[in-house]
Each structure stands twice: as structure tokens, then as C-alpha cells.
Image (cartoon, rainbow, N blue to C red):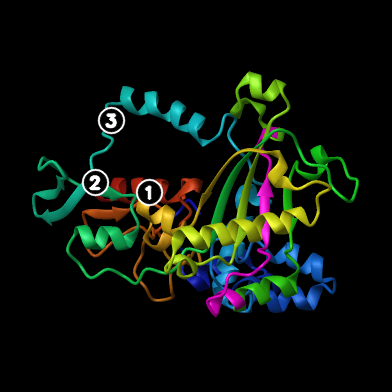
Amino acid sequence: MLTPLLTKSELKNLINMPKVWDYLIERPIGEIISERFANDVIKGVIATDAPIGTFASVSDLQANICFLYHLIGNGTGEWKVPKGGIGALVGELHPVATQSGVDIRVNSRVTSVESNSAGVQLTLEDGSQISSKYLLSNVAPQVLAKLRDKPAPKSLDGSQLKINILLTKLPELKSGIDPRLAFAGTFHAHEEFSVLEDVYQQAKGGAMPSRIPIEMYCHTLTDPSILSPELHEAGYHTLTLFGLHTPAALFDADNKAAKQAALTAALASLNDYLVELIEDLIAAIEIRSPLDIEAEIGLPRGDIFHKDLSFPFRQDGSKPSWGVETDDSRIFICGAGAIRGGGVSGIPGHSTAMAVLEIDQS
């Protein structure tokens, strides 16, 4: 993942696991899961990493790519969170960057990008300009195209509902399991394999389901520092909930009403497993639909991946690439829109830096 892109054949030969390659790359992940497992719940929990954030059936190879990226971390599929949250990571990076001579500007919206033999020029909303030898762009490819006055690739629907909840305490479960154990990892609800496919078909037809498959995390069980000492001492916790198969199209007609319907459906999915209603424990809550994400941080149609994810290789016969290049040799994509996307991994940024260094050293 940290070298120039191999071709499909080169990567297949390097891995040298034909059966694994076949079921991860060539055949729909839903088909493989159905061959290997019988229980509907187990099948669904395994499959959940395939459609989360991607509006696709597990019978679609696009789901395979999403599955691969969710499980590639640390070589084992293990996910980690930085102590103090992503904000703490930014806090560590900021002084390193500024001490290295980086000029950071916020609230400086770019209105156009132009390129010529002298380099790249950005025009900001206030009319000022910034010039550079190269542009490393972290916006979605569709946004970059518009800034360059180029035809923009089609914006696909983002497909996630994000709900952040502050709880006065962890809820008790009907199963009797200790909530500190139940919520310590990933909590899945209504994610049976059959339900995932049924909800996908409902959403594809334009209907908000009465129960939304959810994946949920309680980060405060892992890292209490994200709450104030007072709230932690009082027993408060956070829940971060993702709803699956909630594409932007479901919110187009009336975002506010659709969000309320989606919230009701998501909390109903959780309440099915709790002794008391989650609503009775909520101290604060925020909900973000794909349209909210687009409005607030400029992701077209709220797509957290910027575009459809790509397999981490280039096609046989294509020219060498880091997967970050554009049609302009001075402009690069360093965010999730790169071929090896997933901005939080840092891989696109690394690839872009290496691509630029490669040019300067040649």
C-alpha cells in the first residue's frame, strides 16, 4: 500500500494465494459469505464491513472493495483510535507542521484553480491568490474538477447516517450481558444478512425502513479522556452510531423530516435489545445525514469516500502510477479520492508526497 501501484497481475502474483484472490477480488463477497456460513446473524455481522458507507448490495463487487479497506488495517483488520480522539491527533500534528514552516489558513475558501507552465494558482474567496509549484488537493475529485472548470465526474450517493449521543449512563441489555463488555467493541443491531439485503432494496426503491441496520461504538470505554473529568466521574458515556443503507436520495425531498424518520428507525433498532429506552438516557444528541455532510464539509452527496472506492492496483498495461495523479502533472489528489483512498489511513497523503518527490528528483 506504500509503494507505487502494482498492476492487477503483479499484485495477484505477489500475493500468490489464488483462492483468496478469487473470493476477495473476483467474486461477490455476499456469494462467498453464503457459501461459508449458514447462520443469518453471523453472515450479516461478517458482511457489515462491505456496505458501510457504500450504497451497494453484497452481490456487487463494489462491496468487496469496501470490505477489503475496512479489514486491511495493521495486517489483521484491527482498528485503533487515537487517545483523545482525532482532534488530539490534529493537535499533535499542528505544531510539527508550523515549526516546519507550514502556513495554515482556515476559513479560506478556494474559488478557482488554474495551472500553467509557471505552476498552480489558487484564487480565494477574498480575491487573494496563492501560487505553488504543485497542488496537493484533499477535496473530493468532483470539487477539484469544478474549481478547475473541468467536467466533474458523477457524484454518487453517500450512504451513512451518523449519530453522536451523550448518555447519562450505559443502557442495560435484555440479554443480561454486562454493558461495559457489550459496548466495548463494535455493537451490531439488525444486521442479519437477509436484513442488510432487504433494507438495501427498500432504500433503492426510495423507502426509509422502520428498522435501520446499525453499527455502534462506545469510545469512552476505550478512552475516557474524550469526556471532561466531571462527566466521566458522573458515569456519562458516548455512543457513535452508523446507520447503513441510508443514501442521500432518501433525504433529498425533506432532509429534516427524513432525518427524524431515520433517527426513529435507528434508535428503534437499538431499543429492541435494551431494557429501557435509549431516549430516556440521552443527555445530548446530534444526527448527520449525507446532505448535512455535503453542506458542512463539502463532500459531494455526503460520500465519505469522495467517490466509489477502487481496488488497490492499476489495470494491466496502464502506465506506472501512485494512484494520485490527475490529467495535470502539477495537480495531485492526496485524499480519499485517490485510487488507494481512505483519508484517515494517511496512505493517499504518503503516495502524493512520494509522487512529487519522485518528479523533483528525476
Q: In the drawing, what numbered circle is on residue 102?
A: 3
* Residue interval drawn in magenta: 202-220
Q: Amino acid at mark 3?
A: Val
Q: Nearer the viewer, residue 73 or 293?
A: 293
**Secondary-structure class at tag 2:** helix
Dot 3 or dot 2: first in sequence order is: 3
Q: Nearer the viewer, residue 157 or 35?
A: 157
Where in the figure is residue 37, as x and y percent of width and height?
A: 82, 72
- For disc 1, the marked residue is 296
Q: Residue, x 52% and y 58% (percent of image)?
A: 259
Q: CA distance from mark 1 to mark 3?
A: 25 Å
Q: Amino acid at mark 1?
A: Glu
Q: CA distance from mark 1 to mark 2?
A: 36 Å
Asked if residue 115 lies left or right of residue 141, the reply is left
Where in the figure is residue 67, as x and y percent of width and height?
A: 61, 63
Q: In the drawing, what numbered circle is on residue 360?
A: 2
Discs 1/2, front:
1
- Marker count (numbered): 3
Q: Residues within 10 Å of mark 2 (few under 14, many from 20)?
A: few
Dot 1 or dot 3: first in sequence order is: 3
Tell me, yes or no, whether the highlighted magenta stretch contains residue 314. no
